[in-house]
Amino acid sequence: MRDFLVERLDIPREKVVPEAKLADLGVDSLMFAEMLFELEDQAKTELDIRSADALPETVGELIALIETHLQAGALKASTPPHPAP
């Protein structure tokens, strides 16, 4: 995630720390949406973060949110479908 943000935002690596505010790094709502699409492409999955109650404010919150959605997606993918009655 750190590498992704450094490349995407063109900022020094040492600025990308868990407590860094995304807005202070230059991330607005449009850039956030664009980043989600890029992350989905890279992870080859769909991240339903756009429906989250609140957008993350810090790098740490963003990482936690993405990890939660990736884990939920992995759990869904590993659960066999229920047979039709």
Image: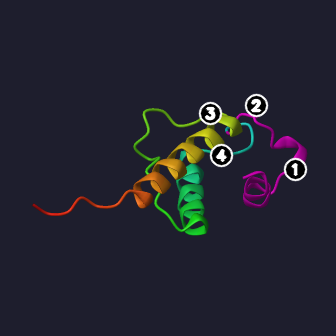
* Label annotation for residue 27: 4
Residue corresponding to mark 1: 13
* Label annotation for residue 19: 2
Marks 2 and 3 in Cβ contact (< 8 Å)? no
Disc 3 marks which amino acid? Glu
Q: Is residue 81 left or right of residue 25?
A: left
Quadrant holding the C terminus: bottom left
Q: Give the magenta part as a residue range.
A: 1-22
CA gap, disc 1 and disc 3: 18 Å
Disc 2 marks which amino acid? Glu
Residue 12 picture location, percent across and down: 88, 50
Disc 4 marks which amino acid? Val
Residue 30 picture location, percent across and down: 54, 51
Q: Earlier in the sequence, mark 4 or mark 1?
A: 1
CA gap, disc 2 and disc 3: 9 Å
Residue 32, relative to residue 39: is it above or below? above
Q: Nearer the viewer, residue 26 or 22?
A: 22
Query: Which quadrant of the view contains residue 56?
Result: top right
Front position among marks 4 and 1: 1
Front position among marks 4 and 3: 3
Residue 17 picture location, percent across and down: 81, 38
Disc 1 marks which amino acid? Arg
**Secondary structure beneath disc 2?**
loop
Residue corresponding to mark 3: 57
Q: Earlier in the sequence, mark 4 or mark 3?
A: 4
**Secondary structure beneath disc 1?**
helix
Q: Nearer the viewer, residue 61 or 80?
A: 80
Marks 4 and 1 in Cβ contact (< 8 Å)? no
Front position among marks 2 and 4: 2
Query: What residue sits 47% from the left and 47% below the top?
Result: 49
